[in-house]
Amino acid sequence: MKVPFYGHVRQYHNLKADIDKAIVDVLESGKYTMGPAMQAFEKEAAAYMGMKHCIGLNSGTDALWLTFIALGIGKGDEVITTSNTFFATAEAIWLVGATPVFVDCEADTRNIDVTKIEEKITSKTKAIIPVHLYGQPANMPEIAKIAKKHNLLVVEDCAQAFGSKGDTFKVGELSDAVATSFITAKNLGTFGDGGAVFTNRDDIIEPILKMRNHGSNKRSHHSVGWNSRLDDIHAAILSVKIKHIDEFNDLRIKWAKLYDKELAGTKIKLPYGKPGYRHIYHLYVIETEGRDELQKFLDEKGITALTNYPIAIHEQEGFPFGPEQGWPYAGGDPKPVLPETEKNSAHCLTLPIYPELTEEEVKYVAAAVLEWEKGPGAKYFK
Ligand SMILES: Cc1ncc(COP(=O)(O)O)c(C=O)c1O
């Protein structure tokens, strides 16, 4: 049996009639940029999130970057975030000239460890950027409390958690803004690139609108901006998909619970969903010694498993390290101490999870994991 990592094509086939119609409608309308399809999606998405504003952009990276600019985060500022995330979270901080300061992740959820944030706050700290990793919100009430005490901004990176919820809070209600991505791989994804900012703050709308359209949202250019518009074709596809997002997330949860059940009793570490949280399992990440061997074993059985994230950001070679960039991790010394993050990098393995999986496939993947644990992997569990 072959179990691919992604279900995009299956999802397209399931929604083909509606998606094809939505695309053709945009093509026939002649309005492809900042047209009615983009505006309609922004309205639908804001309503879904229960937030005042949604600004459609061309990626999650731009959503972070433009929000930081609008909030006045820039040169000389320190921004607290996690190293256990996709590169873009820290990239956007660096792009505005600020310095990412990394806090370790929790041993269970793998989200930012809120008990370690305050020790990293200095007079230069301007903001906290939690990432709702793998589909589960970070501990926003605690983050909001720390931010209030130290007068810091908070931007939620929700690229992996559209439609998730905390136990007592909704995504977006305890921060200045939420940035998200609609790239194909996301649980709400178009067939290509897309992103958005959600906020209840009226004062940051205008700067983001200007930035996304060359410094202007009217006819003249008030400032130097950028081009970061959500194309109408992508907006139209997202309008079709957002109507199904709760159902898609329910199916992800269903497959995660089935993995949990099939893998019960394993010594491999399974994902942790906090009680009362709606973890939507954008990714189902297990952790084990011998991760690379297990990945190869699964591959030989036709199962594609990937790693999120095998190199944490503070260990990435491509990042512009060095004191001249105002980076605290100067050429590896002093290196941030992030033992949980590094443990996760060494051990994480993401099993296929998407709404279009079948029960047979989930059971096949789980059986293969257990076969490895009891067979070639047994040496790691003595
Ligand atoms: C946590 C996180 N932040 C930011 C991004 C960047 O989004 P995009 O690829 O749309 O720029 C991604 C995903 O790609 C992500 O997973």
Image (cartoon, rainbow, N blue to C red):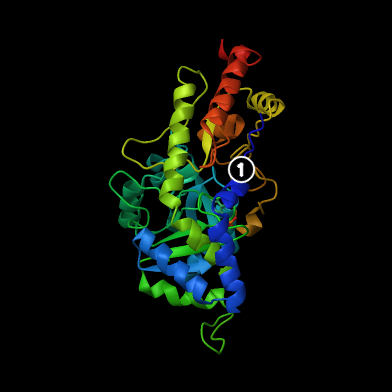
Quadrant in the picture for the N terminus: top right
Vertical placement of residue 130 versus 44, above or below: above
Residue at image location 53% in from the left, 77% down from the top: 35
Question: Would you name the residue on which mark 1 appears?
Answer: 6
Q: Residue at x 54, y 53 (%)?
A: 15
The answer as to whether callout 1 falls within 8 Å of ligand 1 is no
Q: Position of residue 245 (x, y in %)?
A: 44, 52
Of 45 and 361, nearer the camera is 361
Residue 124 position within the rendered picture, expressed as x and y whole percent measured from the top left:
46, 59
Instruction: Work out whether residue 75 can be spotted.
Output: no
Q: Does 253 appear above or below 189?
A: above
SS under mark 1: loop
Q: Nearer the viewer, residue 255 or 158?
A: 255
Q: Is residue 313 left or right of residue 44?
A: right
Please state the horizontal and vertical placement of residue 179, each as a whole percent of the image.
Answer: 48, 59
Q: Is residue 217 visible?
A: yes
Q: Tell whether 177 sits left or right of 8.
A: left
Residue positioned most to the bottom: 220
Picture residue at 41% right of the left edge, 41% below the top? 279
Please tell me which residue is depicted at 50% across the width and 18% down the height of the picture.
Answer: 266
Residue most extreme to the top: 382
Q: Quadrant of residue 156?
A: bottom left
Q: Quadrant of residue 232?
A: bottom right
